[in-house]
Image: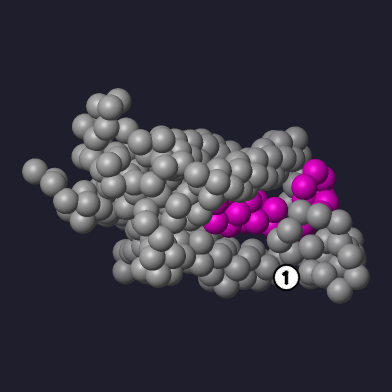
Amino acid sequence: MFRTTTSRVLLALSANATINIVGFGVSSAQQTEVYYDACGSSAFAASALTALAATTRLRPSAIHPLHIALGATTTVWAARLFEHLTSRVHRLGGDSRFDAVKTDPAKFSVYWAIQTMWVGIVSLPAVVVLATPAARLMRFGPLAGLGLGLWATGFAIEAVADKQKADWQNRLGAERKGKFIDEGLWTLARYPNYFGEMTLWSGSYLMAVSALPLSAATVTGFAASPLFITLLLTQLSGIPLQEKQAAVRFHGNAAYAEYVKRTNLLVPMFKFSGTS
């Protein structure tokens, strides 16, 4: 039924859209944000597994090493994100991003539309490779190895940063109000988790580019994935929103001002003169 790469890619994208449409419908009816992150992370895994299953029918002989690499990295990351974000929303009792919109279906739908776009664009290089038969893929070479190493580095940074912040939140409980985390990777950067996420998707991009015959179309087209996640986290919903909230929450807080001065914004490394 799904005999072409394009048809299998569209099937995977439809899995993403379906999860988010259903998630929005249920969430809007209940006026809750608790399903938002669960749907987003699940959509990544569903897209990858749908493409792989449609291409290989899960026959071992039809699965290429690059299928394994991109399928495993996408689903492992999605599973970790699912656990982290669903635990966080229940631990914190909600997500302040949605306080002003979850009772307004029109505004709330924008967030779900952005999430659907996020999943579709960021996962697309992996999905295209997973939707391509093994016979048409290149061998697992040095560029793929570099990409896998970069993914592993980013994954470790994001996972450690998220764990450190979750432990800090659990330890302080209600006493964390008016305080900020300044331990572990967070002593080096204010958003090490975002840096890890941008890094791992850059690694996924390299693996995907290495999987197909080199062309301007794949190199530039697939680049939309790491570029979009970088734009989203640094210019749209990530850092700008967090910085705006911090400016209000820590206004006049000398300790926080000093923390900002001595830490990098993104890269978890010791700050040198002139860096940010």
Q: Which residue is mark 1?
A: 247
Image quarter in which the C terminus is found:
bottom right
- Say which residue appears at 21% left-offset and 39% top-offset: 54
Q: Is 43 colored magenta in this rendering? A: no
Q: Secondary structure at mark 1?
A: helix
Of 114 and 244, which appears nearest the observer?
A: 114
Of 11 and 139, which appears nearest the observer?
A: 139
Report whether 88 appears left or right of 134. Answer: right
Colour scheme shown: one colour
| Residue 24 placement: quadrant | bottom left
Q: Main secondary structure of the magenta part?
A: helix
- Say which residue appears at 48% left-offset and 49% top-offset: 207
Going by the picture, which residue comes out furthest to the top? 60
Whether residue 87 is visible:
yes
Of 35 and 77, which appears nearest the observer?
A: 77
Image quarter in which the N terminus is found:
top left
Residue 162 higher or lower than 118, as above or below: above
Report whether 214 appears left or right of 167. Answer: left
Residue 222 higher or lower than 156, as above or below: below
Q: Could you classify mark 1 by the number of other residues whose Cα lies within 10 Å: few (under 14), some (14-19), or many (20 or more)?
A: few
Whether residue 89 is visible:
no
Q: Is 192 colored magenta in this rendering? A: yes
Residue 66 higher or lower than 248, as above or below: above
Going by the picture, which residue comes out furthest to the left? 1
Report whether 139 appears left or right of 174. Answer: left
Q: Which residues are magenta?
A: 178-203
Which amino acid type is marked by label 1?
Ala
- Residue 30 x %, y %: 33, 49
Of 154 and 187, which appears nearest the observer?
A: 154
- Say which residue appears at 82% left-offset and 65% top-offset: 260
Residue 217 higher or lower than 120, as above or below: below
